[in-house]
Amino acid sequence: MSDIKEITEALIKFRNERDWEQFHNPKDLAVALNIEAGELLENFLWKSHEEADKEKVKEELADVLAYSLLLAEKYKFDVKDILLDKIKKNGEKYPIEKAKGTAKKYNEL
């Protein structure tokens, strides 16, 4: 079993044991994901990245990943496939010869 599938199944088991699936529609999962991403960002507010509390970052990142996996599961997306597809698309938008060493957006290259 893949790690992603194992984690997703553990999340679903946790959710179902608490009868929370009724609250986990795609819109609310996306909202929760955004809120957790904001909480992740809060760890860096007014600090350098070195000053961020790594334990809090780890905890909030876990929440972001959990809601991402639950949202992917809701739409029956294969996480590996969608990530590899996105990397391929980004490779087309950001060819090495134009993008290497620069943080410019694809339309500025």
Image: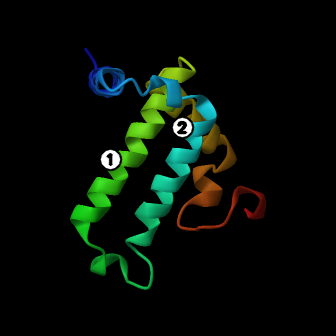
Quadrant of the frame with the N terminus: top left
Q: Nearer the viewer, residue 20 or 96?
A: 20
Look at the picture and state if 42 lies above or below 98.
below
Residue 103 horizontal side relative to residue 52, left or right: right
Which residue is situated farthest in the bottom direction here?
46
Q: Nearer the viewer, residue 109 or 89?
A: 89
Q: Amino acid type of disc 2?
A: Leu
Res 62 label: 1
Q: Which mark is residue 36?
A: none
Q: Specify the quadrant of the image occupied by residue 87.
A: top right
Image quadrant occupied by the C terminus: bottom right
Which kind of residue does numbered mark 1 sit on? Answer: Ala
Measure the alpha-carbon separation of dots 2 and 1: 14 Å
Q: Say which residue label 2 marks.
A: 29
Q: Earlier in the sequence, mark 2 or mark 1?
A: 2
Report the residue at 29% width, 81% height from top: 51
Q: Quadrant of residue 69?
A: top left
Residue 31 placed where, x, y %?
58, 46
Instruction: Say whether residue 84 is visible.
Output: no
Left or right of 76 on screen, residue 60: left
